[in-house]
Image (tube, grey):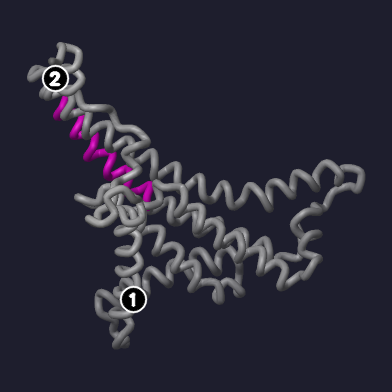
Amino acid sequence: MTGPTTVLAAEVPFPPSVEDFFLPSIVPWGEHSYWFTKITLLLWLSVAILIIYFLVSYRKPQLVPSKKQWLAESLYGFVRNNIAVDMIGKEGVRFAPYLASLFSFILVMNLWGIVPLAQISPNSHIAFPAILALISYVLFLYVGFKKHGLGYFKVVLVPPAPWFILPILIPIEFFSNLIVRPFSLAIRLFANMFAGHMLLLVFTLGGFAMINSNALLAPVSLLSWAMTVALTFLDFAIICLQAYIFTVLTASYIQGSLAEGH
């Protein structure tokens, strides 16, 4: 026997929560496992889309490029000229392939958040931004030690300041340059994708919740769904911006590793 409270709880949808990011397995043999979820599928689709697109675009390069070749060249040229060279200088050209790959991968991964039926970005799980940040972290440390050797510690830790202030500044520089950088890279990307998904969930499910609870709230439900559409366009701008910011900061850290000092 169910009482009024039980019936009411069954009719009212639960609000979105962190649990909405932990999706069930999408393969029949992984019913109680998270090893292959929608998130995993979107990750591999992102990799496949980028590899196939660039291979097809450059399979038969032409002097007058096709639309596919033009888009691929424009994307690479944008990252090479406006990020790699602008941030690092002439040496930035050799880092352009990595930075272009990083930008493209983050952009495609982010875009899943507004694609119908997908509607969630793998980057809304901290693991993916953390791995990308770790790769960039290892890269700029490798570049710094390769150029300066152990002298890289002096470059990255000792600012041009009077000697009596250095005992205070060196721990701050260590924490800022070697600890905070990868952490901030990962958290910035993760937080924006997480928040964007939650906002879309709130306004979408909120519209259904209001119209199911009272037909008089139908106009408010329509307003909630209109906000979902508006937020989708805003989310698209954030998606592109976050891919750009992550790549620019990575280029900035590489530039700092190549510099002779602060």
As for residue 10 lying within the magenta part, the answer is no
Q: CA distance from mark 2 to mark 1?
A: 50 Å
Q: For mark 1, give the secondary structure.
A: helix
Total labels drawn: 2
Image-based side of 222 in relation to 245, left or right = left
* The quadrant where residue 21 appears: top left
Q: For mark 1, does the 10 Å Cα neighbourhood hold few (<14), some (14 to 19), or many (20 or more) residues?
A: some
Query: Considering only order in the chain, which callout, 1 or 2, is on the residue closer to the N terminus?
Result: 1
Badge 2: residue crowd in 10 Å (few <14, some 14–19, many ≥20): few
Extreme top residue here? 4
The residue indicated by pointer 2 is: 213
Describe the element under mark 2 as helix, strand or loop: helix
- Residue 230 in the magenta stretch? The answer is yes
* Region of the chain picked out in magenta, as a range: 219-239
Q: Residue at x 91, y 48 (%)?
A: 163
Closest to the camera, between mark 2 and mark 1, is 2
- Image x and y of residue 259, in percent: 71, 65
Query: Quick check: 39 left or right of 102?
Result: left
Nearer to us in this view, 2 or 261: 2
Q: Examine the rendered structure and indicate whether residue 128 appears above or below residue 80.
A: above
The circle drawn on residue 78 is none
Where is residue 128 drawn, in percent x and y? 45, 54
| Amino acid at the residue labelled 1 | Phe
> Residue 167, relative to residue 151: is it above or below?
above
Residue, x 35% and y 60% (percent of image)? 43
The quadrant in which the N terminus is found is: top left
Q: Which residue is mark 1?
A: 54
Residue flagged by tag 2: what amino acid is it?
A: Ser
Residue at 37%, 75% in the rendered image: 73
Residue 94 in percent (x, y) is at 56, 76
